[in-house]
Structures are given as C-alpha cells and as structure tokens.
Image: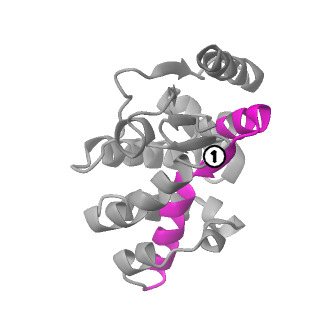
Amino acid sequence: MRFTVAIDGPAAAGKGTISKAVAKEFGFAHLDTGALYRAVGVKAASGMDPVEAAQTLTPADTVGEALRTLEAGQAASKVAVIPEVRAALLEFQRRFADQEGGAVLDGRDIGTVICPNADVKLFVTASAEVRAHRRWLELGGDEAEVLAQVKERDDRDMNRADAPLRPAVDAILIDTSDLSIDAAVALATAAIRAKLA
C-alpha cells in the first residue's frame, strides 16, 4: 500500500511532533524534510557549496543534535531559497513519499510542491508568539530575540520565490496555539483514519 501524508507549517508549530506520532500510530515511514535543509545549511555554513551539499547529501547527514539548534534552522532557511538546492532535494523526498507501506513527510512545501497528490494534507500552525515561546523553552536565550528570529524566518519562508510556505488549498488546518499535543495528534489521526476508511 502506498499512502502519503503531507504535513506542512511554520517553525515550532508542532508539525514534527504530530508527524512522528502519526507515523508511529499507522506504522508509516517518517521524513523530517527540514532535516535535509538543516544538514545542507550546516554544511554550507562550514564552507561547502550549498548546491554541492544538497547533491551529495546522505541519510546519515540528516541526523544529529547539531541540526536542532537555532543556528541550523536559520542556515536551513537561507539555503532553502536557492532553487538548485530545492531541485536536488526534490527527488530524494518524492522517492521517500512513494515507498510501499505509507509515508509521512513534514516540511513547508510538502502538500503544495513535493507531494501535491498526497492522500492527506495537514497544515499545522500557531501564533508567532506561541511558537517563539516553545522555541525559547527548548533552546533558551533571550525570548524577545527568539520571537524576532521566528518572525524573520516566517517572512523569509512565506515570501521566497520558489515554493513559499503556504497551506495547500485542500489542506486541513490544525492551529496548535491553544491545543495540547494529544489533542493536536488526535485531530491529525482522525483525518488520516477517515481517509484510510
């Protein structure tokens, strides 16, 4: 069985947590596509050409604590605006989505660009203030600075020329601003279960 779930949304909205829970619930493979861009961003920040970094990326490059930092997130957002980087990572993601047994991909352009024919599309969001507070709790630092960085990243992600962050027209919106993790996962799971039925 091939069944693709596309989960999009801005940073710290909860899409990664929901994606992992959904993948576990249904026994689907999971890909955090942001990790691809973070890995390329980290390589580029250390001096490697971003396009070359994307073209030579391996699954092993996409794991590790170094990818979870605020700096890695900013680096990812910067390389994600490069069309050649996006093109290099596009096929990697599509192959993953098309695997037997089902797949969940989370990112910023899964439902609109990577998998426009996904069986289920979710757009997970929350207010910038709530997302910044979550990031601050996770990473520490100056909360006002974290909020400024979240807004800056949102602006860059939503206004890039290639594959901007936006919900697919047929995406189900889940606003996690006032939801518990369990409630958000329950909404996502219900949407998928309905489609599988």
Q: Residue furthest bottom?
A: 47
Q: How many marks?
A: 1
Residue 59 x %, y %:
62, 69
Q: Say whether residue 103 is left or right of residue 51.
A: right
Q: Say which residue label 1 marks.
A: 100
Determine whether 36 is above or below 104 in the image.
Answer: below
115 vs 75, nearest the viewer: 115
Residue 93 x %, y %:
48, 55
Q: Residue at x 51, y 58 (%)?
A: 73
Q: Residue at x 70, y 67 (%)?
A: 64
Q: Say whether residue 150 is left or right of residue 192.
A: left
Residue extent of the magenta highlight: 19-47
Q: Say whether residue 118 is left or right of residue 82.
A: right
Q: Residue furthest left?
A: 161
SS assignment at label 1: loop
In magenta segment, residue 11: no
Residue 159 x %, y %:
26, 43
Name the kind of residue labelled 1 in the image: Glu
